[in-house]
Image (cartoon, helix red, strand yellow):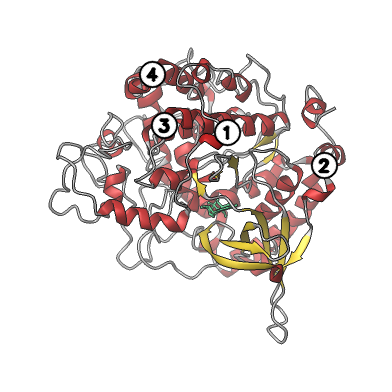
Amino acid sequence: MSVLESQEGSGALSPRSFALQHARPRNSFVGCSRISDYEVLGKLGEGTFGEVHRARSKKTGKLVALKKIIMHNEKDGFPITALREIRLLKLLNHQNILRLEDMAVEHPARGSDKRKRPIMYMVTPYMDHDLSGLLENPSVHFTEPQIKCYMLQLLEGLKYLHANRILHRDMKAANLLINNKGILQIADFGLARHYDGETPKPGQGGGEGKREYTSLVVTRWYRPPELLMHLRRYTTAIDMWGVGCVFGEMLTGKPILAGESDGHQLELIFELCGTPTDDNMPGWRSLPGAENLCPRPRQGNLGYRFREHGPQAVSLLKELLKLDWKKRINAIDALQHPYFRTPPYPAKPHELPAFEESHELDRRKFHDRRAAMPPAPRGGTVGRGPHDDRGPDYRNGVNGAGRYGPPPRNNRGPAPPGDDRVPAWYRDRGLPPRPPPPADGGDYADPYRDRGRPPRGGPGGGTRPDVDTYIPSYDRDPRRDDRRRRDDMMRDDRRGGAEPWDRDQYRDRRRDWDDRSRTSRTRSRSRSPMRDRDRDRDRDREPRDMYRR
Ligand SMILES: Nc1ncnc2c1ncn2[C@@H]1O[C@H](COP(=O)(O)OP(=O)(O)OP(=O)(O)O)[C@@H](O)[C@H]1O
């Protein structure tokens, strides 16, 4: 019996049986090597936990990625999010899920500070691109067969995860890695967790949630409406919304719902998918985050906005971006959607072209190239940011402005005088500009993002008080802002949403955490994470036109 079959219809599993059912072949995980077993070749990017480097195994000659696990606060020990990611990745075994092959340890040099801890690295196969990097490369233009090929692989990976009761909880283009053989793999399991509920069934959408989890998950641009309204009893449908956003992003070449705050995110969703009613989103009124919500009734412009991609693409997108999380299409059904059976048919992975590498650090290269492009004809209006007084529709291109795809890449004219605060490459991307850094870098510094780190110089190091602090930081991308989410999520999960096999460990850690936070509260009240979170939530409740108060 396969892992998947054994999971079908069974109830909650004990930690031991879960681990046994997910066992990978013994030879698929090396164990723990020394960092000297790898030749480090260069930096690929920086994640929440630490830097990612390209390296070559001295034993096999294979290219790998080494993800260094940074301990932001030595006293906290090994980050729990990294432990979760490692444990889950070790259990998973699927062609479309990034494979953890080894852990490598770097011991501090002899004679160095005795208190220094060893540094751990996660070793995964090297992938040539992440999807978001690839979409930013001006010389890459996705064809329809190519998009279908990536979508099928993404859905196969998610079908496997959901059948194995795993919620990814951070579905986004930046977490989808692609190699030059056309293989797509889901990566970054730092927010993932075991799901205690029914596995998706054909024709039954996401079904009903069984228990509560933290709603502080998923990067904002990819966060479904039910999470923005603080549903805690959510299901695998939260990942399917992210697939819809990624699908739209592949079709248009840029993120389709680039909200500047949680409230603004909902506003963009309603513009695209229509406003919630008792018919299209039953139960929405009783969600805690819907209390003060009074959106202007709208039908949604999804069909119009994506009309050039054909009726089948629009139909699949509508299924994935359904407001009703119980009826939102699941991965099993999405794989059967007529979109994949309508010409042009999906390409096979090996038929896809190879592209120039595109990782986080390569992006600057593309941005510079795009900045050198001649300005497009005047006319568009996106990319002016939160200070723009023309309203969110203009800023985010929801009315079709700012489409980013095959050339011409934008429909905007040269920036008006005085608009030079937005970098040229960023204006071309048609996304809202990052909030301006405070003059002294002090008042609005993000206490989460910068916690335990030296202050970041330059742009992106602080946020304005009228948007939540979980804003995409555009010199990198929205995923850099996960740390606060992850910290909050861990805290929330420890209160009751922890996996059963984690509870004892969590109880101990919780006790530690409580002790630590008591000490730090006495030391400095301003560093209390709970206080910061409440303040951030208050910010997001700032009155907007769709709220009653
Ligand atoms: N196996 C890999 N092969 C090639 N590049 C990789 C690989 N894993 C990660 N990267 C690159 O490193 C960057 C950061 O990795 P990753 O997203 O896994 O880190 P993270 O700490 O979880 O980040 P985040 O804060 O974005 O959640 C990514 O932008 C990706 O381009």
**Quarter of the view holding residue 115:** bottom right
Q: Amino acid at mark 3?
A: Thr
> How far apart, in angstroms, are the residues tagged by discs 3 and 4?
14 Å
Identify the secondary structure beneath mark 4.
loop
Tell me which label, 2 or 1, sits earlier in the chain.
Answer: 2
Which mark identifies residue 23? 2
Percent x, y for residue 218?
Answer: 54, 41
> How far apart, in angstroms, are the residues tagged by discs 3 and 2?
38 Å
> How far apart, in angstroms, are the residues tagged by discs 4 and 2?
43 Å
At 47% from the left and 52% from the top, the residue drawn is 357
Residue 233 in sight in this render: no
Q: Amino acid at mark 4?
A: Gly
Identify the secondary structure beneath mark 1.
helix
C-beta proximity under 8 Å, tags 1 and 3: no
Which mark identifies residue 134? none
C-beta proximity under 8 Å, tags 4 and 2: no
Say if 342 sits above or below 33 in the image: above
Count residues near mark 3 (Cα–Cα under 10 Å), then give few for <14, some for 14-19, many for 20+: some
Identify the secondary structure beneath mark 3.
loop
Residue position marked by numbered label 4 in the rendering:
310
Viewer-closest of 93 and 167 = 93
Percent x, y for residue 26?
Answer: 84, 48
Closer mark to the observer between disc 4 and disc 2: 4
